[in-house]
Amino acid sequence: MYAFYSLLVYIFYTVFKKEEEAELEGACGSSPKEPSHVSMETKSKRKDGCTPRLRKRGCGQLSDTSSSSDSDSLSLSDEDDVDDEDVGVPAKTPLAAFLSFKQETEKRRASSTHTDTGEKVTESPLVTVMSHLLSFLEHYSHLQQLQQQAEQYRLQLRRHRVQHRRQMKALRASYRQRLRDKNAVITSLEEVIAQQQSPTTHEHDGERALQGGAWLGLHKLVQSLCGLQGERTQLRGELRLLHSQLEQREQDKHSKVQAFQQQIDELKSCIEEREEELSKLRVASGATDSEKRVLCLSAENESLKHSLSMTQGLLQQLSVIPSQSSTVLIKENENLRSRVVQLEASLQQRVEQLSRLERQNEQSEWRRGEELRRREERVKELQLELDKERSKEPQVKVRTQTVEVESPGTLRQLAEAREKNARLAEKLSSRSERCKRLEEQIRRSDEVSCNLQHKIAAYEREIGTLREELLKEIGHLEEKKDEAVKAAASCSEEHLHDLQDQFRTLQKRLSALPPTLRSMKTDYASLRSQVRNFSDFYGSAIAEAKKQISAAICEMSEANKDLLEKYRKEVALRRKYHEQLVELKGNIRVLCRVKPVLKEDQHEEGQAVVVTTDPNNESALTVLNKGKARTFELDKVFHPQATQEEVFQEIEPLVTSCIDGYHVCIFAYGQTGSGKTYTMEGSVENPGINQRALKHLFSEIEDRKDMWSYTVSVSSVEIYNEVLRDLLSKDGEKLDIKINPDGTGQLHVPGLRVIEVKSFQHIKKILATARRNRITFGTQMNQHSSRSHALLTITVLGTDLATGAKTSGKLNLVDLAGSERVWKSGAEGERLKEAQNINRSLLALGDVIQALRGRQTHIPFRNSRLTYLLQDSLGKGNKTAMVVQVSALESNVGETLCSLKFAQRVCKVELGPAARKIESGGVHGENCS
Ligand SMILES: Nc1ncnc2c1ncn2[C@@H]1O[C@H](COP(=O)(O)OP(=O)(O)OP(=O)(O)O)[C@@H](O)[C@H]1O
């Protein structure tokens, strides 16, 4: 491609240059109005083999005709020689050749794009520039064709005019001839008449006869004269007609010339625009490749020139200060010598150390050998003594006892000597090992020293060669210096010539560099082309891969469409069944959890457990009070050993409903210390409903991420003494509940901090903050009694990715403040006020539930902050779950009965079918059900 574009650019430049040359040539021999065709004409004539004389004549003809437009006999006779073929056919220009080549290229390109599989080729700036250039050339050639046409037309007109003039001339000549003939006839007739007007007497009779014949002839002559006059007028009319035709043609010609001129002007302006565009493009995309190359080469040329000048400067410096460089070299040599001396000294030291060590080693070895020998001799002596003693044994049996008495000492000595001997042997072996090690070290140091010697030798060799080179250089420089001195002394021009020769040889050497540079350039060009090809290849490979991926995705999506549709149906069905199940269970569910009996709860010894659960009936609970057993039927009863997970299992469907776009309210109710906070919040190791619900929420969202996108936001408030406070805000400002000004009639709390939650880990931190900020005090019933109602509100906004339908679910998790009997909890003062407020709000909650149960038109939501805030989740069409916490101890039986009665009341409330909060996405929305 690069080569092709370079070729194109080259052709363009060549053609353009040739065109300009042709124009210049044409301009020298023709009128300014006729720029190119004359030269072409001349060329064509030259091709035909015409003589230079004829050529000159042709040029003269044209200039004559252009200058004299009206009749001129000389020019007319000259114009007769004009050959039609000479002026009619224009010679084929290089531009035309280029255009035909370009058309062929375009055709080939078009055919290649047809054969291609419709891949879209992105044009590079160079291609854009080239296309502009080509279009510019096209316009230019069109303009030339038009000019040629205009010229042809002009020549045709000229031919016509010549023909007309010829015709006119012939007509005039014939007319004059005929006129002359007629005049001759008339004069002859007049002569005849004059002759007849002079009559003689004797010829009267004959005269009369002749008179009658003459009058007849005269009459005929007059008639022919009249005919001639008529012819003359006719000819005049024809002449006038021809004149008018000629004028008409002239006018036509003029108008056509004007039209052509206009077209030429337009095309010129078009070319100017293109040129401007081209220059802009050049500015925008930088210079074309060839220009860049030219720039690059010129830069290289500059750098070469620079290096040449530098070399020249260096040469001059060398010739000027050879002594300085020689001193530097001598200094370097001295330094090297001193370094070698140092190295030799250190080597000598090392060798001395080595010899010292060897001597020491030899001495110690000799000493050790001596010692060993002595020891061995002693052992031998002792052994000899022992043998002697043993040889005495059979002879002196009597002395055995004494020997036995004496021999222990000798044996001891022997054993000691043996031990010593063994120790010495050990020492000897260790010494020999050390010796070996030392030998090894010596060997190594020998190697090192050998290496060093080698190195030193190498250094010395190097130094020697350097020295030699240096001496040579110095000699050479001295020679040069001498020569220079001599040359300076003689002041001859020879030296100058020599220097010039040297300079020339240097220049030659420098100019000999380009082949290597050229080879480097070709290498560079090939590398560049490789890189460019690689990027092309890479791009095409990526494009291919993308195509394949998209095709695969398309296939997959096609294949998966049915599956997806089925999956959607399945999900919808599942949701429907889920909702039916929840509705069957009841949209308000009452669960009861019995708190296990803890040590700290047993204030009095041997307190009886009065609450029992039935293992065969999960919804029944029996309370024994004053000998009477009362059974309560609720939706579900959790026995004291029920785990947090078991409790959440019952709540989970409601949490799922919240994701589906329902408003859900889960609250824990019960006396103080009965385990409400434990059930809702739980402990760090064993989290309660709040954390589990959010975990479930996020896992469900993750499962649905291919079909739905969700936004989860969280807020938390507490109601303490009927005052609303943000649990996620540090300032603890008093908040108010208001109707949302957006016109939906929904409630909202201005200034409440709502945090968008991205992950479960994030929510954990938020819950911890809310827990920290909640007001708790120790009461007689609970050391960490929550003195406020805590609300955790989770809003889940969902968008169906396929249909665009939007859902808005809300999950209210409420940990109510503990209901208590004031006299029992021992509350007074501030605590009493708290307890009263708590009881009042719980009573309001009871009233709301009562009203819902009674299907009253007015539900008293506004009676407390708690019910007002929960309005949109407690009313009709919502889902509610209440976990009633009870204590199993006899001491709390009153509160337990109270709570269970309240629970049973709630149990009978019907909230009606739950309503899903969904907005149609425009594709196929779901009906609110
Ligand atoms: N099911 C249970 N298992 C183990 N311990 C429990 C259980 N329920 C409650 N407790 C413990 O009982 C104590 C009181 O519980 P909690 O604070 O939850 O009561 P509460 O109803 O929230 O009281 P208050 O209304 O005064 O805030 C806590 O120490 C808690 O750990």
Image (cartoon, rainbow, N blue to C red):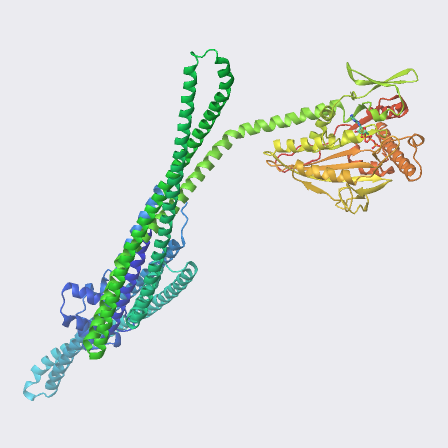
Residue farthest to the left, as pictured:
202
Q: Nearer the viewer, residue 893 or 132?
A: 893
Q: Does residue 297 appear anywhere in the picture?
A: yes
Task: Say whether residue 431 is left or right of residue 198.
Answer: right
Quadrant including the C terminus? top right
Left or right? Give the position of 736 relative to 541.
Answer: right
Please, is residue 470 above or below residue 193 in the view? above
Q: Please name whichever residue, 20 or 538, is drawn nearer the observer in this view of the structure.
A: 538
Q: Residue at x 37, y 59 (%)?
A: 288
Residue 80's place in the image compared with 345, above or below, is below
Task: Estimate the x, y position of residue 249 in percent, counting from the top left.
Answer: 30, 68
Q: Nearer the viewer, residue 541 or 818?
A: 818
- The picture quadrant for ligand 1 comes to top right
Is residue 471 positioned above or below 78 on the image?
above
Residue 170, located in which quarter of the rendered image? bottom left
How far from the left and from the top, in percent, is residue 869? 80, 38
Give residue 195's position: percent from left, percent from top.
10, 86
- Can residue 909 be seen here? The reply is no
Q: Nearer the viewer, residue 438 or 338?
A: 438
Q: Residue, x 40% and y 22% (percent of image)?
A: 384
As drawn, is 861 to the left or to the right of 798? right
The percent coordinates of residue 366 (x first, y second) are: 38, 37
Using residue 42 as the reference point, say whether residue 192 is left or right of it.
left
Q: Quadrant of residue 101?
A: bottom left
Count of numbered circles in the view? 0
